[in-house]
Amino acid sequence: MHRVMRGVALTSITRYATKVLYRATSSSTVASAVGPRDTYQQLVEEGKIDNDTNQVTIVDALQRLHSELKGYVSPTTQAVWKRLFSGRAAKRKIKGAYVHGNVGSGKTMLMDLFYDTVELSNKKRVHFNSFMLDVHDKIHQFKKTVAKSLGKNRRLRHDPIPPVASSIASEAHLLCFDEFQVTDIADAMILKRLFTELFNNGVVVVATSNRHPDDLYKNGLQRSNFLPFIDVLKDHCEILSLDADVDYRRKVLTSAGELFLSPNSPENNQCLTALFERYCEGNTAAIKPRTLHFLGRDFLVPKAFKSVAWFTFSDLCRQPTSSADYLEICRHFEVVFIQDIPRLSLNTKTEARRFINLIDNFYDNRVGLVCSAECPADQLFSQQSHNSTEDARMLMDDLQIQEGTVDARASIFTGEEELFAYGRTVSRLIEMQSKAYLDEKSLARDLLQDR
């Protein structure tokens, strides 16, 4: 195979602001700066990113928050001090930040500049989807504990949200969320209560999103019950817009085309198999199925060797899989091969939703991806539909939703959420084929060698 991205220097890749570009810079750059504004300016002076006036506006806002958080003590911690020392600590209500804008505009990079320089020991940066999975797990564990303690008297109800929020607040006074999005009705129904409790416990939130707060859970089922959360979010976060006319990932990151093979031809599948076997050190006898045990269930990996896994698209997206499955894959494997990705459309909303979720999790955990697909990445999603209307009608019948109602226009029936997320997924697929992305893990970095 030909060597991909020959002669592409890291400094030329890091000319524009994206998350991966920032992570590729030396740790000394961050260590020598005192805040996001100084760090950003230093990266500009070193030629690693361009000065972007829209980004500078966001950096200035994050710098103000950075300064406010110096010496920050949450109200819950203050209450402990008050009980211990009979003093009265001044309450400080600090407003966080919610940065929204186009894909590839540098939102996550700027949040990382802030997070890595803020002087707080109790802070946490997490993908929002992973955070909500952890919340639901904590709720489940709380209910199990309460059920055991109540014994036969299980009619008593205990609200799990306050203790779960208190537990989260004890671990982190600052929560930084990447990709704040709401697509699951189970998440939507608890967010107001959860975040009200978090904010009451003094947690400061910084988040990035492709959507303005007013558009979160847009056209979701029972959205009227979700709307109060938007007001809570606006009350506790400064809303900052970062829009750009260009997706920096597309502009500067050269595609390592041989990692995304299309079409699904016998020749390309043969190349995919050969590359997988090379990663298995030619020891084909050692390639075996592996079962992952987690959350009380088993998940089958069809072919695996050390930290390399092989799946078909059907294995990952045509089965009842979820973020929990994809995160477990990320915990065990550095490189994942996926065979036979089809072109997705409104007729395959469920598969498309899972694929988008899969890529989000792989991207956030820096998993190397090699795959074969029916068409190039920027053509994977088609808006054409032949029978989606009939499918939607059948689903509405199953859910006892009448046509013409608000819920009948929910994105679960129209595919609007999948179409909106399409741009983010394509942008990420392109970045996942770049040298800068693959450089972040040693095994994935090998994809750039001997090609």
Image: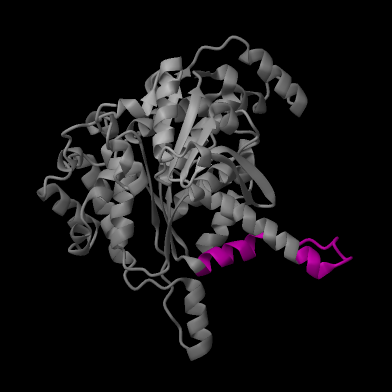
User: Please, is residue 94 above or below residue 85 in the view?
Assistant: above
Residue at horizontal 64%, vertical 31%? 319
Residue at horizontal 47%, vertical 78%? 78
User: Please, is residue 267 above or below residue 78 in the view?
Assistant: above
Depth check: 214 or 354 in front? Answer: 354
Q: Is residue 122 left or right of residue 136?
A: left
Q: Is residue 263 visible?
A: no
Depth check: 323 or 408 in front? Answer: 323
Coloring applied to the structure:
one colour
Quarter where residue 323 is shown:
top right
Q: Where is residue 45 shown, x and y percent of the image?
A: 10, 49
Depth check: 383 or 344 in front? Answer: 344
User: Please, is residue 120 above or below residue 362 in the view?
Assistant: below
Q: Is residue 151 left or right of residue 329?
A: right
- Please say whether residue 158 is one of the residues in the magenta stretch: yes
Instruction: Specify the quadrant that holds the C terminus.
Output: top left
Q: Is residue 392 left or right of residue 205?
A: right
Q: Where is residue 37 shown, x and y percent of the image?
A: 21, 55
Q: Where is residue 205 shown, x and y percent of the image?
A: 43, 56
- Please say whether residue 399 is one of the residues in the magenta stretch: no
Quarter where residue 409 is shown:
top right
Furthest residue toward bottom: 85
Residue at horizontal 49%, vertical 39%? 309
Q: Where is residue 306 shown, x and y percent of the image?
A: 48, 47
What secondary structure do most residues of the magenta stretch adopt? helix
Count of numbered labels shown in the rendering = 0
Residue at horizontal 15%, vertical 43%? 11
Instruction: Specify the quadrant that holds the N terminus.
Output: top left
Q: Magenta segment, which residues? A: 146-170
